[in-house]
């Protein structure tokens, strides 16, 4: 069900009830949720790029996570478990293809067994359905080419194309009377007692400026979330540090070596899951992503450098505290970034038969990772609510899986904080 879309190039009004900044999967899901609850809202989604879902929402592993990894009781755990279910129902209803091809999380040796057992307990505590502890024979049955002595099998982990999901949310927003404006960058938010003035750059090439007002603003800016928060004058409790992740693509004749997904047991000190093999909806198999500091927030290539952004990262006190804690891991990641042999070596631990020739260069994504001033990598989703502006500050993986539920959380809180109850 592929449709051709067109979005507005400029806002059609000067005033809105609600403006959502950011046309990624979280912003679009949030806009959709508000219009479902309040069809009369004059609502616009403003996206700085020429199309929606061009950043994290269009550069990810495409996995529908089930919620195994996350601390019980955290927003991530709740939103992922409920979000998995909500995503499947949404796709069934809207004819978006997905596949529950299942995944194994593999312990390579005895030293990883306690962490594997802990993950299994977490999954159970979070209410993830269908988890199975698989011994070596069962693992061979599930993934004949995977190494490992034991694994968690999650049969309900699935794959999907999140750009299709984002486009479907966008279509619903438009059908409901909402506007989606692309090529429209918010450059300032000036909050008054009962409205916010938004300064816009509506043509990146001509630098044409515009200004609109909105009673309520919700920012879902991904890699720019802290900048948007700073614009509204309240500062930001965190700074976004971009982590690039590169993928290799398995040569077509080797795809059959992977049935579903093969993941490592993640290092609990680190928010990323480690390089893995993932089947894609188009039949490809991707291997990755690694996690290296990017020198630009939207730096999809190794040498894309934005000096001001790099300077901001380097002068943030939390960055050096984080670097002090994770320098060894950081250096290993950098080595694998520059050396294909290093990357292949990491993959061969999970699939010994794979060789360098089997791995072709693939795409990259950049993760928006929120970092606290004390050097803590903020693990959970973080949403900041104010009287008429709210900021989604940290929405890393599994925010695509969880998008429908994050949207409900944002809308529930906004109904209360914005005192929307009873208003049109
Ligand atoms: C490599 C990688 C792999 C991942 N794998 C998975 C996975 O398998 N499963 C999963 O569930 N999640 C995964 N994720 C996480 C998931 O992709 C993100 O959590 C999710 O896409 C976040 O959506 P978002 O809308 O918050 O951000 P984004 O998609 O980044 O959207 C933010 C939007 O805001 C716009 N914007 C920013 N500033 C402004 C401004 N001033 N004015 C107007 N617009 C602005 C940006 O242009 C952008 O389009 C992965 C992420 C990465 C990077």
Image: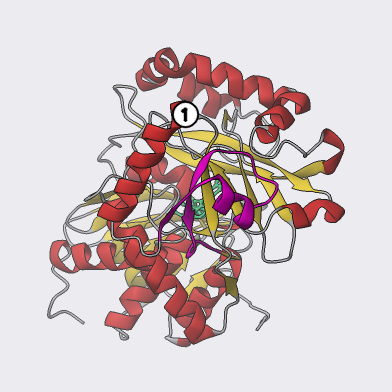
Q: Residue 331's quadrant in the figure?
A: top right
* Residue beneath the point at 27% across and 35% down: 237
| Left or right position of 4 against 89 | right
- Camera-side residue of 286 and 298: 286
Q: Is residue 147 magenta?
A: yes
Which range of residues does the magenta coloring cover?
A: 131-158
Please give the residue where the numbered disc 1 appears in the rendered image: 110
Taking the image as drawn, is residue 255 in sight? yes
Q: Is residue 124 magenta?
A: no
As drawn, which residue projects farthest toward the front?
137
Q: Residue 176's quadrant in the figure?
A: bottom left
Image coords of residue 197 (percent x, y):
33, 57
Image coords of residue 24 (percent x, y):
50, 60
* Residue beneath the point at 34% across and 52% down: 123
Image coords of residue 336 (percent x, y):
68, 25
Image coords of residue 326 (percent x, y):
45, 19
| Left or right position of 344 against 70 | right
């Amino acid at each position: 069900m592929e449709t051709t879309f067109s979005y507005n190039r400029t806002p059609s009004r000067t005033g809105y009830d609600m403006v959502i900044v950011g046309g990624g999967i979280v912003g679009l899901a949030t806009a959709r949720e508000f219009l479902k609850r309040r069809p009369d809202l004059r609502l616009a989604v403003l996206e700085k790029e020429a199309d929606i879902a061009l950043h994290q929402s269009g550069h990810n592993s495409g996995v529908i996570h089930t919620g195994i990894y996350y601390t019980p009781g955290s927003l991530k755990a709740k939103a992922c478990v409920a979000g998995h279910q909500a995503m499947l129902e949404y796709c069934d209803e809207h004819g978006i293809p997905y596949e529950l091809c299942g995944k194994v999380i593999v312990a390579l040796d005895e030293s990883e067994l306690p962490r594997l057992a802990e993950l299994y307990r977490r999954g159970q505590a979070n209410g993830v359905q269908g988890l199975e502890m698989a011994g070596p024979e069962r693992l061979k049955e599930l993934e004949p080419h995977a190494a490992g002595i034991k694994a968690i099998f999650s049969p309900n982990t699935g794959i999907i194309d999140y750009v299709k999901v984002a486009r479907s949310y966008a279509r619903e927003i438009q059908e409901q009377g909402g506007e989606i404006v692309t090529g429209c960058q918010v450059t300032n938010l000036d909050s008054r007692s009962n409205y916010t003035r938004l300064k816009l750059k509506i043509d990146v090439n001509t630098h044409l400026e515009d200004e609109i007002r909105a009673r309520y603003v919700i920012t879902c800016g991904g890699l720019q979330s802290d900048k948007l928060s700073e614009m509204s004058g309240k500062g930001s409790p965190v700074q976004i540090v971009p982590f690039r992740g590169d993928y290799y693509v398995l040569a077509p004749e080797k795809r059959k070596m992977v049935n579903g997904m093969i993941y490592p047991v993640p290092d609990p000190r680190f928010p990323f899951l480690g390089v893995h093999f993932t089947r894609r909806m188009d039949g490809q198999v991707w291997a990755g992503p690694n996690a290296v500091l990017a020198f630009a927030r939207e730096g999809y290539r190794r040498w894309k450098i934005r000096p001001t952004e790099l300077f901001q990262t380097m002068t943030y006190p939390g960055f050096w505290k984080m670097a002090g804690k994770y320098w060894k891991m950081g250096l290993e990641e950098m080595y694998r970034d520059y050396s294909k042999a290093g990357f292949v070596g990491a993959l061969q631990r999970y699939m010994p038969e794979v060789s360098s020739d089997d791995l072709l260069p693939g795409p990259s994504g950049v993760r928006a990772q929120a970092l606290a001033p004390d050097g803590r990598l903020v693990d959970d989703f973080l949403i900041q609510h104010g009287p008429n502006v709210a900021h989604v500050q940290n929405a890393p993986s599994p925010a695509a899986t969880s998008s429908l539920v994050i949207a409900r959380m944002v809308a529930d809180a906004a109904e209360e904080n914005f005192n929307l109850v009873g208003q049109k």
